[in-house]
Amino acid sequence: MKKPKIFVALDTTNIKKISHIINELKRTKINFGYKFGLEFLNSLNGRKFVAKTKNQITFGDYKLADIPNTCASAIKSVKDLKFNYITIHISAGYNAIKAAKKVAGSTKLVGVTILTSLNDKSLKEIGFNKSVKKIVYTQAKLAAKAKLDAIVCSPQEINIVKKVFKKEIITPGIRLTGHSSDDQKRVMTPKQAFQNGATTLVMGRSLIKGNLKKNIQKLIKELK
Ligand code: C5P
């Protein structure tokens, strides 16, 4: 199966809507994978839907952030879903990401750096006095040491991450030109993110909110 270039964040609990989105995206020439996040995975039918999803690249965005034993156990508990990718916060610590990696098997373990909804000011509010860039750099080094398979960062830190992390770089915080950044603070357009060296993008609202067909057309045009 070809590596996906864009993971679509299926952030809804509406199964019909998700099936519609997947069907529309299959008709394009872009290589899409599907990211299931906390909203869908915690919904009543979410897990069942993922269990039935075949022949697609799937991404379980669990964003684990717990003690090593709990992170590892959580990964084991979703083995049946055969995710291609699962996320863990690097801030859970070296022992947690290492323990998770040990049990991940063929699922790629993705280390999440500082959320794209945060900036330097928001970090200060939670007691972190270093800049986003400095922390992301440190976390990327830790991810490399723990042999994680991919990193999630904003497209604005790709250059920094690349210095120390040589595998996949997945970037959320993507907006089509002129679209609202919503709650995201560190954003870029899809084209800019690829130009900066992103391996894969994550796109949610900019694609699935509003008119899906129009957004897909806009995406195709912008990527040319
Ligand atoms: O709608 P939007 O494109 O902003 O969605 C981005 C998606 O990527 C969401 O599902 C969010 O949970 C996820 N994400 C993120 N920032 C990170 C990691 C994941 O926005 N650092």
Image (cartoon, rainbow, N blue to C red):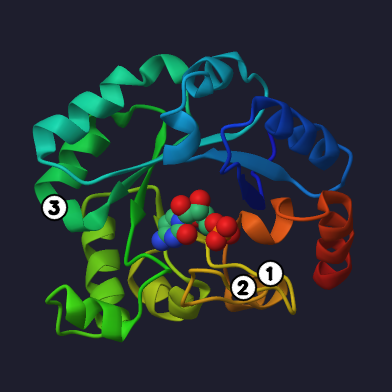
For disc 2, does the CB lie below 8 Å from ligand 1? no
In percent of the image, x 30 and y 66: which residue is there?
140
Against 4, residue 70 (above or below) is: above
Q: Earlier in the sequence, mark 3 or mark 1?
A: 3
Q: Nearer the viewer, residue 87 or 42?
A: 42
Q: Are marks 3 and 1 in contact (CB under 8 Å)?
A: no
Binning the other alpha carbons within 10 Å of mark 1 as few (below 14), some (14 to 19) or many (20 upward) gives many
Q: Disc 3 and disc 1: Cα gap in Å?
A: 31 Å
Image coordinates of residue 6 in percent, x first then y, are 66, 52
* Image side of residue 102 versus residue 115, left or right: left
- Type of amino acid under label 3: Tyr
Residue count near mark 2 (Cα–Cα under 10 Å), binned few <14, some 14–19, many ≥20: many
Residue 52 position within the rendered picture, expressed as x and y whole percent measured from the top left: 60, 14
Give the residue number, with chain letter if any, for mark 1. Answer: 190
Q: In whole angstroms, how far apart are the C-alphas of marks 3 and 2?
A: 28 Å
Relative side of 24 to 19, left or right = right
Disc 2 is placed on an element classified as: helix
- Image quarter of the N terminus: top right
Q: Which residue is mark 2?
A: 193
Q: Are the residues flagged by discs 1 and 2 in contact, CB closer than 8 Å? A: yes
Question: Residue beneath label 3, please?
Answer: 94
Amino acid type, residue under disc 1 in the picture? Pro
Whole-percent x, y for residue 222 in the image? 82, 71
- Please give the name of the residue rendered at 66% of the width and 29% of the height, measured from the top-left corner: 56
Looking at this view, is 204 or 55 the one in front?
Answer: 204
